[in-house]
Image (cartoon, helix red, strand yellow):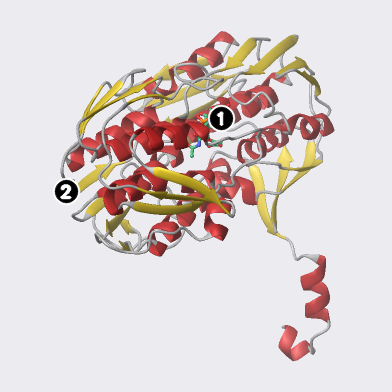
Amino acid sequence: MDCFRIDGPVALSGSVPVAGSKNAALPILAASLLAEEPVELRRIPQLGDVRVMLRVLECLGAEISPWYHAADSTPVPGGSASMPGGSALALSVPDDGPCEVPARLARAMRASFCVLGPLLARRGRGVVPLPGGCRIGPRPIDLHLAGLAALGAELSVERDRVVASAGRLRGATIDLTGPRGSTVTGTANILSAATRARGKTVILGAACEPEIVDLGRFLVSLGARIEGLGSRVIEVTGVDGLGGTRHTVIPDRIEAATLLLAGAITGRWASSAESTVRLTGVSPGDLAPVLAALRGIGFDIAEGVDWVAIRSAGRPLPAQLAAEPHPGLPTDVQAQFTALLALAVGRSTVRDDVFPERFRHVAQLRRFGASITVQAGTATIDGRHALRGATVVASDLRASSALVLAALAAGGRSTVRGIHHLDRGYELLDAKLRSLGARIERVTQETAGRRAARLALPAAVAG
Ligand code: EPU
């Protein structure tokens, strides 16, 4: 198991490119099952969850090329290309093929469930185990199932698997509003399935996150007829078949936000009294709620067509923040803002309306000396003047990046364990932070069991 060793505090400065969006790439890869001709996808981030999705697609009969550079088609060695346009993949999916996702892959990632709608629409059958994913509170799939049933699918849950079949799906009016707003991957599933249904589908309470808009654009480029992307009501007129396309995935707004917050949390230690972190290959519009929150707590933000920069010279002001569905502040940056406000000049509150139980990072942040309590989905944070290095364990993807942020700002050495969570969703975050001046090192730890096994071997073999 790897961990990060981080020595802080060091001010960050410089410019880094942002990778393609994980949460756009995953449903787009799943929706590639609908394409009857080859698809080329560009700016696909090289990270754990994408690799799992590629395995899922291969198990369903997809042929997938090795990664290559979009610009010149040269091969990309594992985990290297983070650039505008970045690394690309070509896929083709036959009409017939296996329709069952292996349980070990489904359990590894919630987005695996996004293949069910495309499978039903293309092959009339899908067997997908109940999904796993980050432990950030209850994550039901009732809205996915109700939506697919409304499109005419027959569904049952057998031995922890959803077994679904359908003749040709038929258009319907479907409301995806749940108790906490819409569902993002549920909208992806129903939107994808409806592209090939007979007649018109109206999705009410649709998620309007940029990742859903990007999925919709991908589907339109395959030949789908979709209106209302980015709004709460999406209308899909089913077509008889979908072709192929070339599509470039949007930049990852959550990775961008995490890097901006890394600049924010470390800026006050800059020897030149301030530091600037500049991100390239971003869509500032998609970052609007994050940029507004950062400006609101005193940071200086500049932005251009495809770049954004933060200047940081001091502690943040306190704030009352709430994570909400788009266009609110994303729940996927709640943990990172909680870490940043641990250093604010006064008392802040951070509420998570999407996942009110998503606060497992708080107990770990306290180890750095942060003063935070959580009650009923709201963290109350009494800002400290400084944090101190600590050994902490990440519980989920965004919690792990919040702990990295705290460690960058904390005085002395920190160790962040459990970074396999971080590797699921960030492409080379440690290398990017290092290029900005952070002292962050990835350490591969031998487990006690492996060490004992190795020590039991003759030296010649063990070496
Ligand atoms: N919900 C239901 N019923 C459902 C589905 C969801 O009640 O059938 C509820 C959930 O319990 C939650 C709310 O609706 O309270 C929103 O959940 P949603 O379904 O939108 O979450 P998701 O689609 O499973 C995606 C992202 C998450 C991100 C959320 C919210 C992907 C692959 N995952 O999850 O990303 O937090 O939307 O924006 O797109 C991450 O990247 O770290 C991550 C967890």
Q: Earlier in the sequence, mark 2 or mark 1?
A: 2
Q: Is residue 287 above or below residue 164?
A: above
Q: Is residue 339 above or below residue 247?
A: above
Tell me the crowding category of disc 1: few under 14, some 14 to 19, or many 20 or more residues within 10 angstroms, Cα based: many
How many numbered discs sit on the rendered protein? 2
User: Is there any visible trace of residue 345 in the rendered image?
Assistant: no
Q: Which residue is mark 2?
A: 243
Q: Amino acid at mark 2?
A: Gly
x 80%, y 78%: residue: 453
Kindly tell me whether mark 2's CB lies below 8 Å from ligand 1.
Answer: no
Q: Which residue is mark 1?
A: 332
x 33%, y 29%: residue: 213
Q: Is residue 233 left or right of residue 295?
A: left
Instruction: Point out residue 327 in the picture as x, y percentages from the top left corner.
Output: 44, 17
Q: Which type of secondary structure does the marked residue at label 2 adopt?
A: loop
Image quarter in which the N terminus is found:
bottom right
Q: Is residue 134 left or right of residue 218?
A: right
Instruction: Point out residue 177 in the picture as x, y percentages from the top left corner.
Output: 47, 21
Kindly tell me whether mark 1's CB lies below 8 Å from ligand 1.
Answer: yes
Image quarter in which the C terminus is found:
bottom right
Instruction: Point out residue 219 in the picture as x, y percentages from the top left corner.
Output: 25, 38
Q: Amino acid at mark 1?
A: Asp
Viewer-proximal residue, 139 or 25?
139
Q: Is residue 329 left or right of residue 173?
A: right
Viewer-proximal residue, 188 or 28?
188
- Give the CA separation, mark 2 to mark 1: 33 Å
Q: Which type of secondary structure does the marked residue at label 1 adopt?
A: helix
Tell me the crowding category of disc 2: few under 14, some 14 to 19, or many 20 or more residues within 10 angstroms, Cα based: some
User: Is there any visible trace of residue 165 in the rendered image?
Assistant: yes
For the residues carrying marks 2 and 1, which lies nearer the camera in this image? 2
| Circle on res. 165 | none
Instruction: Point out residue 337 in the picture as x, y percentages from the top left corner.
Output: 63, 23
